[in-house]
Image (spheres, coloured by chain):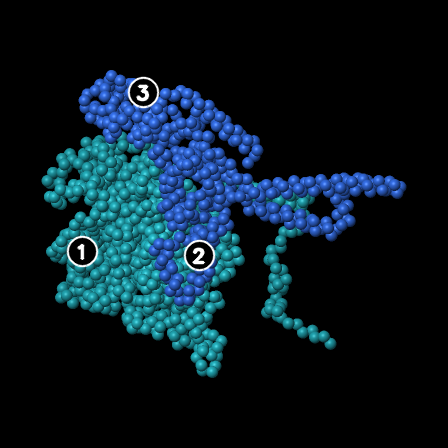
């Protein structure tokens, strides 16, 4: 009898739930409309039979093929009269200077056939130049600054009343009005960002002399006519400069020297990203962060960061204390009192007691004269206390130089606020504005805009019809910096020059030139600069000077170091008690949340919002692109959303972020909220600089995206209205905020969605200085990976997983002959020096013609960046802890996905690892990716057919696929290279890739080839350091070293063989040519082994 | 090359030769009384000292010298004037000063010449006869590719064979019908060529299949070969790309050998960036003007007209740049795809490759520049496979060589490289993708 036993294939058969059965049998949930289609009467009436259809198909195919065969006739137009120093095909580099009111750097501009295409730090001169490394440090904002030159939304000539006009008309109208205002005894105000150009100052003085009446001794103008110069920093430092005025009688931003600082304590100053002279700070900081460089005299620096949000500086700190914004001034008081106690000075009292702060105080006191306390709170009282601490520690004259102070950040918030009042009162006859956008960036921007209408005549020198300029009577567009002559005096005695690297693209004019013209001085600005310099040089010496050679040398070098001021006798005269009182009321806490406003590494204060390279550059910490958002402590966000655990807050392609409504002092703002480990509980952080062009102003294509109906939608929201003006300075923190869910979700484009490394020790390795100092890497922090093999290796008579051999001994592939055969290009990346700034990403973008793909594509993980900066937070969970708590393995791993509330951060730049046994090469069906005998993993775009096997087989996920032809109108909003103007920024040495091919880091093979050619032509071996990749040249901290691993004397070889060197994912045995150096933290913890 | 054009070219050559002969005759008769020795000496001195600014029969920077002696007769000392014009001006001679003013006050450089030499020069210029025009320059005839002649013969043979087969078939058919007629059967209807072929194929299926297959294979191969020539405009199998240029610059005339009556200017005199840049560069017009400021006449009226075009573009009026400059839009002849990184400098400065290796006999028979080489990747890498690297005396390769000798791999690579006793570009990585594609 046959068995009738039935076997279940799935549980639903047991249940035999009625609804489960159709689901099982019917593959398609919704029926396909086949019947309807066949029943369509029109189909039968169609005269196109199957054969005809095939004929059409065949014809169109062959027609298309034949049409494609025709080769276009290409015209070639040589120079009529070739300039001697231009050879088509060879790049020229010019020394110049970048300054935009916030960032300053001596740079080299690369031009090809007269077009600037790349910017890097000046390798030999300038305050941002690191002497021993031969590199100049610039940040992402500076090396991306070549792109705005080719912005198609720049104004092409003077504009009045929204219509284009001419310079003749502008000059006539404005000069007439100036004369009229002056004769009537009116007030003319020149409102600028901090002007550090002596020649521009001179031009303003010329205007003053012409239209301002002579001021009597009593400070009263004879007929009341006044020309005033008011400076306004978009991000204010008035608190600090005012404090310096009260403490030392100098309203300046001092020069800091971090190379001398053994201990750094920073209160919310993100000095590696956005605070102070960052291009100087970064390289100086890095000199003290490599353990190998540590000596008894100059130990590895200790960095304390006390802050509310996780900043770039905080992420690099050895000890970090998170606290609400209102607590930070109190912590400054506490530290002051701790130091005062040691110094025998009188305390202020009332500081926030914090156990760790006393440790910081101990360390500071031990490193007297070699320490530095910085503070980012824009409050005069707090800054005065910081001055007092530094004074007690004896840091003036060593880490802080007031004699050779900088000229940055001279802005005066009180004067600006008074100006708005005066404008409203109709007391300002004329307003000329350069380098500022107060309608956007003032706390009371709207009020400013109203007041602007009451000014007799307003002129903006903005390059775009931005928020302020579009409300002005005249816009007289300034040159782009790459089109301008200019000079700068960033510090006492230190001069710098900027020279044009291209003729002005549009009918623009440099704004000091306009001032000169309106003052009746017919002199071009270049000659004006020369006159100012000649006068300055002559005034310092009685000897006759050879001005021409001095000028030429300065132009070649980009800088002119005239003199260094002698150390001066300082006395701290600040009123500590009053300062303490001020600090205590700097921000009185309260409400559900406190808000801290910050500027991002990429967008800065907002003037770069139109730059798509920067919009798409992931934020170093949040990894978000194309947005600003509310950073919340994960615990706060969990409470707010009510979800059970952190993993449910995951933001990814199909997992949008919660949208929240933030209310601060009556101002409401709707933004997405993201969990930000390290954010102090009870506080939220929002980036400034977003929401440009909210009223349809055209400030660069990338600043606004298009919605489905092609309407412009600003990227992010403008958070400047959340700043407030109190006690003479603009404040970037507020209390009394509330946060509520709106009920909507908001899609975010995150370049990295993982938070932690999940115990993968072969990805990121880290240790502490104490462990490193034992110099036993194999036993402690840098264990070499091994593989279990099916043989009794350890001779215990059994084959177990303890029978292991080093990965180097197990291989699927035959050895690739790279050792000592020709070159072997390789790289080392020091995770200690890397501070996560991301300048390498934008440098790579610029060098390698990387397309920008826009938010929606980034959300789908389709960003094209050849290099990324992985950021890992530490987790509280480790296997040891988990086992103690009796957790299972899966449970433990799930917990490891959750970052710590007080995490350590590690940054890891990842590009193609150029594996000598590359898994991608073996799977390519068309041999489009192959290995070179110089160790490069090569990619032949025209061979690639787009199967993406290689990307799937790449363990590092560094291969990027061109899903679209990005150089088309479809990507016009984001891709700069889509139009004729933007295309000028492309590097002609690198192919522009098209749809359907894979691309990835080539180790800048174009530079390698060029370097080899130079060596061959000169008949000498390739000199170590002569060939640089874009990222290694662009790294401000020297974390990336590139060179020939087969050159035994090369720097890269030495570093690659050093103790800290390891390969990422060493256990898979792909033998990369990129080496990483273990991160060494200068912390007390015995083992910070587990990231 | 099509027949008519070749004919016309030969014809033009003949015409030129005849014209030249006639001209020569007329010139010889016109100046029968000149002294050949003095004329020769004068020509030498003239070319050495005067030719930069003067022509015998035309005005240049300075006036035409023909008849100068006669013009100076009785007005001053022409010898002193030639030897040191500035000093002679100082004497206040009226004619000299008038000349100086007339010729834009550009002083004539002092000449260290003897009176006898001056006499020779004046004899030369007075008896000057323009040289016979060159015979149309070296005539260019692209070589007929060998294979195409062979093909023609094969085609003719094939056609002959087909005719024979067809006539034989016809004869067979007629004979068969005659036999059938004799046998009293109906003669077979004439099915025509295709009908017969069909019947034959039906009767001989095996042969028909083999032939059919061969035909298909042949056609596929032909299509394949043809497809490889898509977008190829040089090499042996396709017509070379030879666009008409805005100015008919003659490469052979400028760069060809002097012994063939050409100017033998070094290629890199004009294409100077070939030695240092990836681009050889089209020379800017100021490079043309280095010579053509003085050389304002071609060897034919057409040539002179082309030179005038340079003047029109640069705005040169014969004495100064007064006109509006206007760019010359050349048509690019050698078009590499965008994804190929080719560096002239590497090949010229390091590889020491002759220009002609890729650009063909541009100095011998290329009045109009054309794409000689196919510029296909196969052509590139074939050369990389055969060409030896110029290593001798180059410190770069010494270092690479040293590393190879010390390699831990036991010189395996070195032995492989030296198997055929030469080190080719390929052996040093010249076949690797990223050498040219990035």
The spot of residue A937 in percent (x, y) is 44, 58
Residue at 44% from the left image edge and 64% from the top image edge = B412
Q: Which label's residue is closer to the chain start, 2 or 3?
A: 3
Quarter of the rendering occupied by the N terminus of chain A: bottom right
Q: Which residue is mark 1?
A: A401
Which of labels 1 and 3 is toward the front? 3
Chain A's shade in the image? cyan
Mark 1–mark 2 Cα distance, whole angstroms, equals 65 Å
Q: Secondary structure at mark 3?
A: loop
Callout 2: few (<14), some (14-19), or many (20+) C-alpha neighbours within 10 Å?
few
Locate residue A85 relative to residue B246 in the image: left or right: left
The answer to whether tags 1 and 3 share a subunit is: no
Which of labels 1 and 2 is toward the front? 2
Callout 1: few (<14), some (14-19), or many (20+) C-alpha neighbours within 10 Å?
some
Q: Secondary structure at mark 1?
A: strand
Mark 2–mark 3 Cα distance, whole angstroms, equals 66 Å
What letter labels the chain drawn in blue?
B
Q: The disc numbered 3 marks a residue on which chain? A: B
- Does the rendering let one see residue B272? yes
Query: Contact, CB < 8 Å: mark 1 with mark 2?
Result: no
Q: The disc numbered 1 marks a residue on which chain? A: A
Locate residue B170 relative to residue B381 in the image: left or right: right
């Amino acid at each position: 009898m046959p068995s009738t036993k039935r076997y279940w294939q799935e549980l639903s058969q047991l249940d035999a739930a009625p609804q489960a059965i159709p689901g099982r049998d019917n593959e398609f949930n919704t029926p396909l409309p086949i019947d309807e289609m066949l029943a369509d009467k029109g189909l039968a009436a169609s005269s196109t039979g199957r054969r005809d259809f095939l004929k059409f198909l065949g014809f169109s195919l062959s027609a298309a093929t034949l049409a494609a065969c025709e080769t276009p006739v290409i015209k070639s137009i040589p120079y009529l009269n070739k300039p001697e120093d231009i050879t088509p095909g060879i790049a020229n580099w010019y020394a110049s200077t970048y300054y935009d009111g916030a960032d300053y750097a001596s740079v080299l501009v690369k031009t090809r056939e007269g077009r600037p295409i790349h910017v890097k730090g000046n390798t030999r001169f300038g305050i941002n130049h690191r002497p021993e490394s031969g590199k100049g440090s610039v940040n992402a904002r500076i090396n991306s600054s070549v792109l705005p030159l080719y912005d198609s939304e720049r104004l092409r000539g003077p504009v009045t009343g929204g219509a284009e006009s001419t310079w003749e008309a502008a000059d006539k109208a404005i000069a007439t009005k100036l004369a009229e205002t002056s004769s009537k005894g009116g007030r003319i105000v020149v409102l600028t960002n901090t002007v550090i150009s002596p020649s521009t100052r001179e031009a303003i003085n010329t205007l003053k002399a012409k239209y301002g009446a002579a001021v009597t001794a009593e400070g009263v103008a004879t007929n009341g006519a006044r020309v005033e110069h008011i400076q306004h920093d978009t991000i204010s430092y008035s608190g600090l400069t005012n404090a310096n005025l009260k403490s030392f009688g100098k309203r300046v931003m001092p020069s800091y020297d971090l190379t001398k600082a053994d201990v750094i304590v920073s209160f919310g100053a993100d000095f590696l990203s956005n605070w102070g002279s960052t291009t100087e700070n970064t390289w100086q900081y890095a000199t003290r962060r490599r353990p190998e460089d540590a000596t008894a005299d100059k130990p590895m620096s200790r960095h304390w960061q006390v802050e509310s949000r996780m900043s770039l500086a905080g992420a690099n700190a050895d000890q970090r204390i998170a606290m609400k914004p209102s607590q930070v001034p109190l912590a400054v008081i506490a530290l002051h009192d701790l130091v005062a106690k040691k110094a025998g000075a009188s305390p202020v009292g009332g500081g926030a007691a914090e156990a760790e702060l006393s440790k910081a105080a101990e360390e500071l006191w031990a490193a007297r004269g070699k320490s530095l306390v910085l503070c980012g709170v824009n409050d005069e009282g707090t800054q005065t206390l910081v001055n007092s601490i530094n004074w007690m520690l004896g840091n003036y004259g060593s880490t802080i130089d007031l004699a050779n102070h900088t000229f940055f950040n001279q802005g005066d918030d009180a004067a600006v606020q008074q100006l708005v009042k005066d404008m409203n009162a109709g007391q300002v006859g004329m307003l000329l504005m350069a380098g500022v956008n107060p309608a956007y960036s003032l706390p009371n921007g709207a009020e400013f805009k109203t007041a602007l209408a009451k000014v007799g005549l307003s002129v903006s020198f903005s390059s775009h019809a931005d928020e302020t300029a579009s409300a002005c009577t005249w816009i007289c567009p300034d040159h782009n910096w790459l089109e301008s002559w200019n000079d700068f005096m960033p510090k006492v005695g230190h001069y710098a020059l900027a020279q044009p690297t291209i003729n002005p693209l549009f009918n623009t004019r440099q704004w000091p030139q306009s001032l000169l013209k309106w003052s009746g001085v017919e002199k071009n600005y270049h000659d004006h600069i020369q006159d100012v310099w000649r006068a300055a040089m002559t005034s310092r010496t009685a000897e006759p000077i050879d001005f021409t050679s001095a000028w030429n040398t300065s132009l070649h070098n980009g800088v002119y170091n005239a003199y260094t001021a002698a150390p001066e006798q300082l006395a701290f005269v600040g009123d500590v008690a009053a300062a303490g009182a001020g600090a205590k009321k700097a921000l009185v806490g309260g409400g559900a949340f406190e808000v801290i406003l910050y500027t991002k590494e990429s967008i800065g204060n907002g003037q770069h919002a139109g730059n798509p390279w920067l919009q798409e550059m992931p934020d170093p910490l949040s990894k978000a692109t194309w947005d600003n958002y509310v950073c919340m402590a994960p615990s706060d966000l969990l409470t707010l959303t009510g979800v059970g655990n952190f993993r449910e807050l995951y933001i990814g392609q199909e997992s949008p972020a919660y949208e929240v409504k933030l209310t601060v002092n009556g101002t409401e703002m709707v933004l997405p909220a993201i969990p930000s480990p390290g954010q102090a509980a009870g506080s939220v952080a929002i980036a400034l600089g977003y929401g440009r062009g909210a009223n349809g102003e055209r400030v660069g294509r990338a600043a606004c995206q298009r919605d489905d109906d092609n309407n412009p939608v600003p990227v992010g929201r403008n958070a400047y209205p959340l700043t407030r003006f109190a006690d003479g300075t603009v404040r970037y923190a507020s209390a009394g905020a509330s946060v509520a869910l709106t009920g909507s979700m908001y899609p975010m484009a995150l370049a990295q969605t993982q938070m932690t490394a999940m115990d993968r020790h072969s990805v990121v390795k880290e240790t502490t200085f104490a462990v490193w100092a034992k110099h036993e890497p194999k036993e402690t922090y840098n264990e070499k990976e091994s593989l279990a093999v099916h043989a009794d290796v350890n001779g215990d008579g059994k084959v177990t997983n303890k029978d292991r051999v080093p990965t180097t001994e197990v291989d699927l592939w035959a050895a690739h002959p790279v050792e000592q055969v020709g070159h072997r290009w390789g790289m080392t990346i020091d995770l200690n020096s890397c501070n996560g700034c991301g300048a390498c990403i934008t440098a790579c973008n610029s060098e390698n013609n990387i397309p920008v793909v826009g938010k929606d594509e980034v959300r789908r993980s389709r960003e094209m960046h050849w290099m990324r900066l992985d950021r890992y937070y530490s987790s509280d969970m480790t296997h040891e802890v988990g086992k103690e708590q009796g957790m299972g393995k899966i449970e433990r791993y799930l917990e490891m996905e959750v970052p710590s509330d007080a995490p350590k951060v590690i940054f890891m730049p990842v590009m193609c690892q150029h594996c000598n046994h590359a898994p991608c090469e073996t799977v390519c069906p068309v041999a489009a990716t192959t290995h070179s005998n110089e160790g490069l993993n090569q990619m032949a775009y025209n061979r690639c057919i787009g199967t993406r096997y290689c990307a799937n087989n790449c363990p590092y996920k560094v291969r990027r696929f061109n899903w679209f032809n990005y150089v088309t109108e479809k990507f016009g909003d984001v891709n700069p290279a889509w139009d004729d103007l933007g295309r000028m920024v492309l590097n002609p040495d690198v192919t522009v890739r098209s749809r359907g091919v894979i691309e990835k880091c080539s180790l800048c093979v174009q530079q390698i080839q060029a370097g080899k050619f130079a060596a061959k032509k000169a008949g000498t071996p390739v000199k170590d350091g002569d060939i640089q990749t874009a990222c290694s040249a662009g790294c401000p901290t020297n974390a990336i070293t590139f060179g020939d691993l087969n050159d035994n004397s090369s720097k890269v070889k030495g570093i690659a063989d050093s103790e800290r060197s390891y390969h990422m994912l060493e256990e898979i045995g792909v033998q990369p040519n990129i080496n990483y150096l273990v991160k060494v933290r200068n912390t007390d913890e015995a083992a910070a082994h587990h990231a | 090359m099509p027949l008519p054009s070749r004919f016309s070219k030969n014809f033009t050559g003949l015409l030129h030769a005849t014209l030249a002969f006639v001209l020569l005759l007329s010139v010889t008769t016109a100046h029968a009384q000149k002294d050949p020795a003095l004329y020769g000496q004068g020509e030498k001195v003239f070319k050495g000292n005067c030719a930069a600014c003067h022509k015998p029969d035309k005005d240049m920077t300075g006036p035409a010298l023909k008849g100068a002696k006669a013009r100076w007769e009785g007005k001053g000392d022409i010898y002193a004037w030639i030897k040191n014009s500035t000093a002679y001006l100082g004497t206040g001679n009226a004619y000299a000063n008038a000349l100086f003013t007339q010729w834009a006050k550009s002083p004539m450089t002092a000449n260290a010449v003897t009176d006898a030499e001056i006499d020779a020069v004046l004899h030369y210029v007075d008896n000057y006869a323009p040289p016979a025009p060159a015979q149309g320059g070296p005539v260019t005839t692209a070589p007929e590719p060998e294979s195409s002649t062979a093909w023609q013969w094969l085609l003719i043979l094939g056609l002959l064979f087909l005719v024979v087969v067809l006539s034989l078939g016809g004869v067979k058919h007629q004979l068969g019908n005659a036999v059938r007629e004799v046998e009293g059967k109906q003669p077979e209807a004439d099915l025509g060529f295709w009908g017969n072929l069909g019947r034959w194929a039906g009767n001989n299926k095996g042969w028909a299949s083999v032939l059919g297959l061969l035909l298909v294979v042949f056609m596929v191969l032909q299509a394949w070969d043809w497809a490889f020539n898509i977008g190829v405009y040089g090499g042996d199998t396709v017509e070379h790309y030879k666009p008409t240029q805005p100015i008919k610059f003659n490469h052979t005339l400028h760069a060809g050998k002097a012994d063939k009556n050409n100017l033998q200017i070094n290629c890199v005199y004009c294409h100077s960036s070939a030695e240092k840049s990836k681009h050889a560069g089209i020379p800017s017009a100021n490079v043309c003007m280095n010579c053509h400021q003085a050389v304002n006449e071609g060897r034919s009226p057409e040539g002179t007209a082309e030179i005038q075009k340079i003047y029109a573009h640069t705005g040169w009026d014969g004495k100064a740049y007064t006109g509006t400059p206007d760019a010359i839009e050349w048509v690019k002849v050698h078009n590499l795809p965008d994804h190929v990184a080719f560096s002239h400098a590497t090949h010229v400065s390091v590889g020491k490759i002759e220009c002609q290796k890729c650009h063909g006999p541009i100095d011998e028979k290329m009045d109009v520049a054309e794409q000689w080489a196919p510029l296909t990747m196969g052509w590139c890498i074939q050369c990389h496979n055969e060409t030896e690297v110029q290593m001798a005396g180059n410190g770069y390769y010494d270092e690479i060589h040293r590393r190879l000798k010390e390699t831990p791999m036991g010189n395996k690579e070195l032995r492989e490289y030296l198997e055929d006793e030469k080190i080719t570009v390929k052996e040093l990585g010249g076949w690797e993708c990223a050498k040219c594609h990035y």
